[in-house]
Amino acid sequence: MPPWLPESGWLQVLPRGARDHPRELQEALFPHRLEHDPNDFEANLNLGAVMLSRLNPHSAVPALRVAVRTEPDRADARNMLGLVLASTGRAADAIEQFEAALKIEPQYVSARFDLANALVKAGRLNAAITNYRKVIAAFPEDPLPKQRLEEALAAQARQTSESLRH
């Protein structure tokens, strides 16, 4: 029996009713698992996801760094770490994680979209536009990448216009 499982061998983690809160149950479970195995990939990845969903990205960084260190070839972990880093204002570090995720899994469209968003934040509009176009090619019906592409193209036009004035 895993050491983090109660002696009874039964742990209720699914909601039983309207008053049960699955996120809170998960949030309580993962740190307990990490007490027994600080390198537990799934616990670190899921704890990072819970912290991100609670809009607490700074708290998610350590857990996701452990997840990436434990299983560096998991594109999903690298993408989630990239999201967290981007939301804490660390665009360059985020770009590095998104690019690593895409190196592992080149067709990972979510990572490509997240990369494009981070590239915009970093002011690398040409690269962002290229990546938005690849996302649109994969999902032509999704309006959000099209909107972001239009915004990036407009920002690029403003940059060009400003550079011509100076």
Image: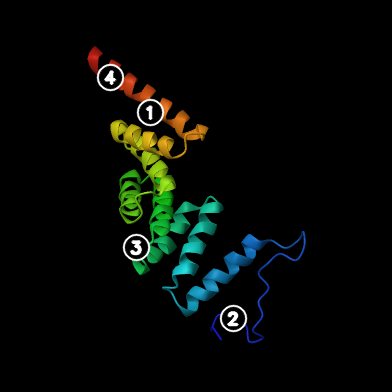
> Which one is nearer the viewer's eye here, 8 or 28?
8
Q: Please tell me which residue is depicted at 36% across the width and 24% down the height of the picture.
A: 153
**Above/below status of 156 relative to 9:** above
Q: Amino acid at mark 2?
A: Leu
- The residue indicated by pointer 3 is 73
Is residue 154 rendered to the left or right of residue 46?
left
Label 2 CA crowd tier, 10 Å (few <14, some 14–19, many 20+): few
Label 3 CA crowd tier, 10 Å (few <14, some 14–19, many 20+): some
Element at label 3: loop
- The residue indicated by pointer 1 is 152
Is tag 3's residue or tag 4's residue first in the polypeptide sequence? 3
Q: Amino acid at mark 3?
A: Asp
Label 4 CA crowd tier, 10 Å (few <14, some 14–19, many 20+): few
In this view of the protein, can residue 150 be seen by the observer?
A: yes
Residue 160 numbered tag: 4
- The residue indicated by pointer 2 is 5
Q: CA distance from mark 3 to mark 4?
A: 39 Å
Q: CA distance from mark 1 to mark 4?
A: 12 Å
Label 1 CA crowd tier, 10 Å (few <14, some 14–19, many 20+): many
Is residue 82 rendered to the left or right of residue 164?
right
Task: Quarter of the image for the C terminus: give it.
Answer: top left
Q: Please tell me which residue is depicted at 43% across the width and 54% down the height of the picture.
A: 80
